[in-house]
Amino acid sequence: MDSIDTTLFAKVQPVLAAALKVNPADITPALQFGDLPQWDSMGHMEVMVGLEAALGVEITAETITALTSVEAICTHLAQNGHA
Amino acid sequence: MPETTLEVTPALLIPPHLVGQIQSKLAYVDEAIAAARVAESGDRITLALRAAGREGEIEAKVQRVVQEMAQGGIAPRVEILEDHLDRPVSYAADPLAELLARREVYEESTGIFTFGPLMSRLIEYFESRFLELAAHFDAQPYRFPTLMSAEFLDRVDYFRAFPHSLTFATHLREDLDIINQFAEKAKYEGRGLNAPAEFFSQVQALLSPAVCYHLYFSLADHPLPDGQLIATSVGTCFRYESTNLTSLERLWNFTMREVIFVGSKDFVLEHRERSRQFMQAIFEELGLAYRVETANDPFFVGEFRKQAAFQTAFQLKYEIRARLPFKDSTLAIGSYNYHQDFFGRHLGITLPDGKPIHTGCTAFGLERVAYAFLAQHGFDPAAWPVAVREALV
C-alpha cells in the first residue's frame, strides 16, 4: 500500500468515524469496506453522504464502487484538488 | 370512489428514473389517497382523494416524500445485459379482461387472486422450465414455511428497508374473555374486521416476503459445511402494495421459484451469471420478449436514495423485464441477485476460513411469467411458441 497523505487522512478520519458511528481511532489508513461491521452496504452509503457533505465528493456509481477503502478515498481527494 | 382531486407541484423536479418509484410510494402517504400519478415530465403529481378537507396536510406529506427521494438524487448506473424486446409477439390486448371473462382469474380480495386451469397449467409448465435450471446446478430441494420469524427479519434489517410492504401474522390473545367477545361480535365491516387492535397478540411472525431468506435463517450462527451450497425452493410471498394492487401485475400474494447460491463471492457471482446464460436459451424457446437490466429493490422512502444507489452501483440486481405489448411497457418477471456478504454478516454464517459467506439467488415470479406470456402470445395455442403448445395442448 502506498503511504497515505497524513493531511488528507486527518480530514477523512473524523468524517468516516461520524458516518460509521465509531471511535476515530477505529479509522486506520488500512481500513477497507467490510473490515468493520458498521462499514457494510448501509454504512458505505453513510460514508459517501458524509464525504459529500464534508469534502464535496460527488456521489456517482463510479465513486460509490471506487471509494471502498481509506486509501482509495485519500487518493481520490488528492486527485481532485484536496491535497 | 374518489371524492376530490389534488394537484401538487413538487418542490423539486422529479428526475425520469424516479417517476415510477415515487409514484408507487405515494400510495403509502395517507389512507385518503385512492390513486396517485406522477407526470412523466416530473413536474406534477395528481392525487385522487377519498375525502376532501385535508389537502394541505396531504400535500405536505407528499412534498416530504419527494424531498427525501429526489433531493441530491444519485443517477443509477443502468446496464442492459440482454435485449430481446423486439422478439415477435402475436397479441396486443391486456389478457386480464379475457381471463376475468373466462373465470380463469377471480379476484377474491384486493391483490388476492385465484387461478383456473389455464393459468395453473401455464404456471406449472413455466415452473418446470425453471426447475431445469435447478437440475443443471444439482440444486438441493428445500421446503419453507409461509410464516417467517419476526426476530430473524429484524436481524437482517428488513423492517428498516421495506416497512411499507410487510404483512403481519397475528392471532387472538390467549384470554377467554377476548376470544369469547371476538366469537360473538366479530364482523366484516367496511374495509375490515371490527375487532379492536388490543384483541390481537404481539407480532411474532410475518408472511414471508421472500423465499431465500428462509435458507439463510436456517444456516444462521454456524459455519457453512463444505463452504458452498446450491438450493432450490418454491414459496408463496407477500408484499403489500396498497393502491398499486390494481391488476395481475402486482399481487399481494404471489409465488416465487428460486435457485439460491451460498458460498464465496466468486462462487455466487459465477453461478448468478451462469443462471442468466442458461435461462437465455429457455426464454428463447418460450418466445418471450424481454430485457435483462440493472434494477433496485423497492426500498421505502428514507432508505431509498442511499440503498438504491448502492445496489445499482455495485450491480447487485438484474431484473428480467418482459414486454407488455398492450401498454408499451415492461414487467419484472424475475431477477438475478447478489447480496454480497450481507446475510453472512448479519446472520453469522461463515466460510471455512472464518469470513462471512456471500449469497445470491435467481428468482422467478410465476404468476407474472404466465401473465406476461399471455400478454405477448394470447389465448390461441396455435399462435403459441412450439415448446409451449406441445407441452400444454
Image: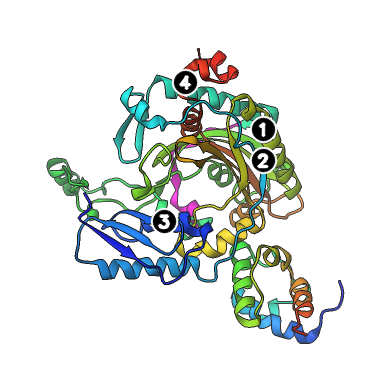
Residue nearer the viewer, B355 or B23: B23
Chain ID of residue with mark 3: B
Q: Residue at x 56, y 43 (%)?
A: B218
Discs 2 and 1 carry the same chain letter: yes
Residues at discs 2 and 4 both on one chain: yes
At 22% from the left and 55% from the top, the residue drawn is: B50
Q: In the visual, does B271 lie left or right of B160?
A: right
Q: Which numbered disc, 1 or 3, marks the residue that appears first in the sequence?
A: 3
Q: Which residue is mark 1?
A: B280
Please name the residue that numbered disc 4 is placed on: B121
Tell us which disc is closer to us: 4 or 3. 3
Q: Name the front one of labels 2 and 1.
A: 2
Mark 4 residue type: Arg
Residues drawn in magenta:
B141-154
Real-space CA distance between mark 4 and mark 1, rounded to the nearest whole angstrom:
22 Å
Q: Is residue B345 visible?
A: no
Residue B137 part of the magenta segment: no
Q: Is residue B380 above or below residue A54?
A: above
Point 78% across, 73% down: residue: A71
Q: Position of residue B187 (x, y in %)?
A: 16, 42
Residue B98 in sight:
yes
Image-quadrant location for residue A18? bottom right
Disc assigned to residue B23: 3
* Closest to the observer, B174 or B146: B146
- Which amino acid type is shown beneath numbered disc 1? Gln
